[in-house]
Image (cartoon, helix red, strand yellow):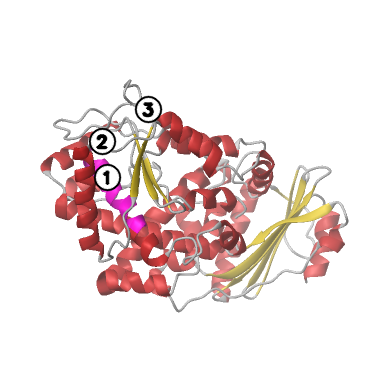
Amino acid sequence: MNDQRSKNILISCAVILVVACLCLSVLVIAGIGVSLAWPIRLGQGDQIQSPLPSAEDESFVGEVELPGDLAEQLSGIESQVIELRGINLQEAVTHTLISPDELQEIVVTDFFAEYTDQDAQRDVLVLSALGLLPENFDLKGLYQVLYSEQIAGFYDDEIKEIYVVSGSEFGGLEKMTYAHEFTHVLQDQAYRLSEGLGLNDEACEADSEKCAATQALIEGDATKTELLWFEAHASRQDYLDVVKSINLFETPIYDTAPPFLQADLYFPYEKGLAFVEHLFEQGGFGAVDEAYQNLPVSTEQILHPERYPADVPQSVSLPDLGNLLGEDWELFDQNVMGEWYSYLILAKAYQESHQIPERVAEEAAAGWGGDAYAFYLNEKDQSVTFVMESVWDTEKDADEFAEAFSDYADLRWQESDTRILGYPSWTAENVSVVFLQEGIRTLWLMAPTEQMVLTILSELQ
């Protein structure tokens, strides 16, 4: 998706988000679980061994060395993670203590330095056309607030530093998350996140599906390591800290985020963990390490690890419609939607009344075989034309998606009394929609007018 640009900035720093408690309750009940984040605001735990200095302390002057006892704890966690994960540290990593205000400045001026207001506005045009955001949504503002409030530690793979935000207590949840973050250090040193694995803006813009799959492998690996660390090394006090964290855990910004974004933020952690668990059951971390040499290439492989690595996407191409649309139109975005976003469109529309049941959407998207999409933008009136051609594993899979899409379309638009070239169509204000299926191929087309749809459809048939 085109909003991948903003996500790539964050991926490049291997940032952990507070997106929800996820399986923390399982951790308390069964003794294992998942930590997706390092929350900034936790309650005061009992017997905290090494509280961080507060940014309000007069002695705090920005970037400072970590207190000796905290540095010793981090060093201990690092040694334990190295032993568990089986990757040696090639060079020492620098730790930097920053205040929450400095974190906010980093989020605004570094993470989003190249993500302009115009970029965000265009992304909203695209995402609102897909029904995932309302028009004029402040996407950049949401990202900045979400990341500023929820990050309490991150690894910057460009300058090879782990940043620790002051003001947090270093309890059980923080220790788990540090184990997660330090796993990113080991991954970077062994495989090079940006250069070796392709987690950079240029590569991700060229192939957003492979980028999403790679990120899921990386985060799933770090989450699995975090789990193993907690099982092996957590103290009773760490367990008590996590219990308190669950009771106090709040994500007010995340809770107000659009449904698709909530689910998408989960994806690399939740689905990535399931993917890595599948590999781990087959051959431990040796099998996980092999995946770095043969990277997953689609969200389909992440969602269905049994299909990895054999089931690779089919190549789909679309003709350039620029000349057909006219000089007022420009190609704005083209890439692969993938199984994951095909599901999100059907199940996670911004308007709850437009969402079809999650199970139906999952089954409809599960037969995905490959696709290509393109967005064209008219700068004069900010209108959008969208075309997406998909191929499915079997004709039955194509039938299932076509049926699910028809249910979705009936909820979102008004079914047209007339068919376009014999195919079902829908209309709404300033948009005409048509969907067709031929064998294992489906085509979804949206344009401002029915005449434009007819013209483009005649070209694509």
- Distance from label 1 to label 3 (Cα)? 35 Å
Q: Nearer the viewer, residue 163 or 438?
A: 163
Residue indicated by mark 1: 24
**Amino acid type, label 2:** Ser
**Disc marking residue 245:** 2
Residues packed near mark 2 inside 10 Å, few (<14), some (14 to 19) or many (20 plus): many
Above or below 412: residue 405? below
Contact (CB < 8 A) between labels 1 and 2?
A: yes
Q: Is residue 79 visible?
A: yes
In magenta, the rendered stretch is 169-185
**Amino acid type, label 1:** Leu
Q: Secondary structure at mark 1?
A: helix
**Disc marking residue 61:** 3
For the point 41% across and 68% down, which residue is it?
304
Q: Is residue 19 left or right of residue 434?
A: left
Query: Which quadrant holds residue 308?
Result: bottom left
Mark earlier in primary sequence (1, 2): 1
- Look at the magenta stretch and give its main secondary structure: helix
Mark earlier in primary sequence (1, 3): 1
Q: Is residue 389 left or right of residue 326?
A: left
Query: x and y percent of residue 23 in the render?
Result: 29, 48
- Distance from label 3 to label 2 (Cα)? 29 Å
